[in-house]
Image: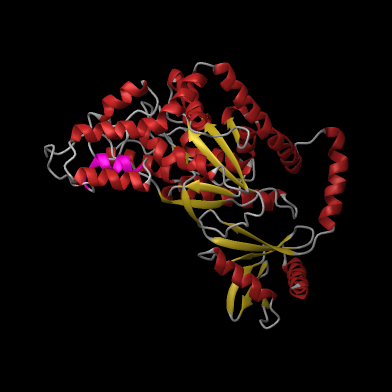
Amino acid sequence: MRRAQVQAGCSAVPRVTLLRRVFLLAPARSLSMQTRVLTGITTTGTPHLGNYAGAIRPAVAASTQPGVDAFFFLADYHALIKCDDPARIARSRLELAVTWLAAGLDPERVTFYRQSDIPEIPELSWLLTCVTGKGLMNRAHAYKASVDQNEAKGVDPDDGVTMGLFSYPVLMAADILMFNAHRVPVGRDQVQHLEMARDIAQRFNHLYGQGREFFVLPEAVVEEDVATLPGLDGRKMSKSYNNTIPLFEGGAKALKAAVMRIVTDSRQPGEAKDAEGSHLYALYKAFATPDETQAFRAALEGGLGWGEAKQALCDRLERDLAPMRARYDELIARPDRLEEILQAGAARARRIAQPMMAELRDAVGLRSLRSSAVSASAAGAKKNAKAARFVSFRDEDGQFRFRLLAADGTELLNSVAYANPKEAGQVQKRLQDAAHAPQWAAEGDASFVLRLDGAVIGHGPAQPDAVARDALMARAAEALAELSAAE
């Protein structure tokens, strides 16, 4: 999940989420239903103009779309992974919360909260950690990048790698799965982390669901059209380049001082300017209407001086930013009011998280001793009432497989590995199609195989002897016949 990330001083942590213009990597839900969209905001750094245009403004606009149940959270636990400056964390939490509210995020319309105010999230993170393979975490891009850098330096591969960095995808999965988000906006480099969240959710559902899907599998939503503003020197605006234009910090005076330092060419007033090659024009265009942009371009090409052009940019920016800055100054002077807003958002979020966590605790066996016997009896009755079924999953090597389970949950067959879920799903459909005759055959004294059109597609679990093997193979054939009949 990609986080709307602002960097300043502390090392950047792996990004979480961001709402922008998007296309889906997974089938779209109908917006006639409430679609829950989750956006995380990293709390390290002070936002600048580029953050606003590229992240905050489009996210706030997207949160107002009909049919969207938007969740925004300050990812302050994630911020601790690489930033160990408490004062910076505390200040950044304040500034980021105020910035998003000043920019138009409506806490009455969206659920806006701090990650650290939801104790169910780290609790869920632990439950998910217990079903997540280390091999899956070994493949996380951020961890691999750290290992590669260490190896290039000739030091221990895990030098400086904390468990926070190593396992942060599990915490990210908990952020998403706690609220069963349908869509999570991500950058292309973060798609892997959504896939991990889906894998972890499927694993938990398989182990503890008993036919119930506790977690919705979130859809990755990839940014397609993102506003990237040039900084004072023409490079991408970034704290790491020290070329940013402040959003609210320092007020109108600081904004104007920064704009006046924007690098321009040596063309004099009266000389035609190259609008498309001008950083001033790119900045103006990001905030102006089409008519205003056209007029500004014509003025530049007509010989407008750079000083006048910079003043025009200041005036245009102030028209948008001044009202927001007033709200920012009002809110940042009232931390008690901000705390009320965040606590109200946390209370709303916990109305979902608390009952969800209670169900998950019960599912894994963390129950009251008074209810354990009753729960076990009810679970047994429910298990006996289920039918045979296929369960898809992703193994630790990233390959796609499926299991055939009996009505009571007994594993009858484990498929071979497939490169993608579509291929595995097609095999399941063919197994249930009467036109295809599966062939069961013993494999030694302990196991058996299933062939389809001559190719091995699965193996039975090892048994103590041939008698047990044959009995299980008969159960597997019967279960598959039931599935075919139901189909």
| Main secondary-structure element of the magenta-colored stretch | helix
Q: Is residue 404 left or right of residue 25?
A: right
- Rendering coords of residue 48 (x, y %): 37, 31
- Comparing 101 with 472, the one in front is 101
- Rendering coords of residue 483 (x, y %): 75, 71
Placement of 330 over or under 18, stated as above or below: above
Q: Which residue range is magenta in the image? A: 277-286
- Comparing 86 with 333, the one in front is 333
Residue 410 visible to the viewer: yes
- The number of numbered badges drawn on the structure is 0
Residue 163 visible to the viewer: no
Structure colour scheme: secondary structure
Identity of the residue furthest to the bottom in this view = 435
- Comparing 215 with 270, the one in front is 270
- Rendering coords of residue 132 (x, y %): 58, 45
Identify which residue is drawn at 62% across, 22% down. Answer: 340
Q: Is residue 146 left or right of residue 218?
A: left
- Is residue 278 highlighted in magenta? yes
- Is residue 437 highlighted in magenta? no
- Rendering coords of residue 90 (x, y %): 48, 20
Quadrant (top left/top right/bottom left/bottom right) for the C terminus: bottom right
Identify which residue is drawn at 68% across, 51% down. Answer: 205
Placement of 6 over or under 189, stated as above or below: above
The answer to which image quadrant residue 129 occupies is top right
